[in-house]
Image: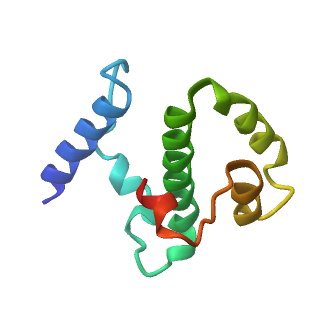
Amino acid sequence: PAEKLNELMEAAQKEAFCDSLGEYHPHFWASKLHFHITGVPFYNFPYTFGYLFSLGIYARALREKADFEEKYIALLCDTASMTVEDLAMKHLGADLTERSFWED
């Protein structure tokens, strides 16, 4: 099983870094305990939420094209000064409690 995890880890690194690194770390998965702490969602949740939120923002940018840049800059300026729900509503007109934001 460890050999398979090593293979997967190295493949993921090559994909993420577009084969641009001189060396890869197949045992990286073993050094990061939090990868395996599924019973403690508070640790991994911010990463997952941030990734999904950025996908929603990116989808908006693709639809709105050049009109989106000003909204995005304003959103970045307000980051950490309000809740993410308020941030999305103010700058994207999006209600994060609605499935449509996450599925678009």
State the image coordinates of residue 8 (x, y, percent, origin top left): 21, 46
The residue positioned 65% from the left and 33% from the top of the image is: 68
| Placement of 20 over or under 75, stated as above or below | above
The residue positioned 56% from the left and 27% from the top of the image is: 65
Please indicate whether residue 68 sits to the left or right of residue 6 in the image: right
State the image coordinates of residue 86 (x, y, percent, origin top left): 76, 63
Residue farthest to the bottom, as pictured: 39
State the image coordinates of residue 47 (x, y, percent, origin top left): 54, 57
Return the residue nearer the eye: 14 or 63: 63
| Placement of 77 over or under 18, stated as above or below | below
The residue positioned 37% from the left and 68% from the top of the image is: 36
Return the residue nearer the eye: 77 or 94: 94
The residue positioned 58% from the left and 72% from the top of the image is: 97
Return the residue nearer the eye: 7 or 88: 88
Disc tally is: 0
| Placement of 15 over or under 38, stated as above or below | above
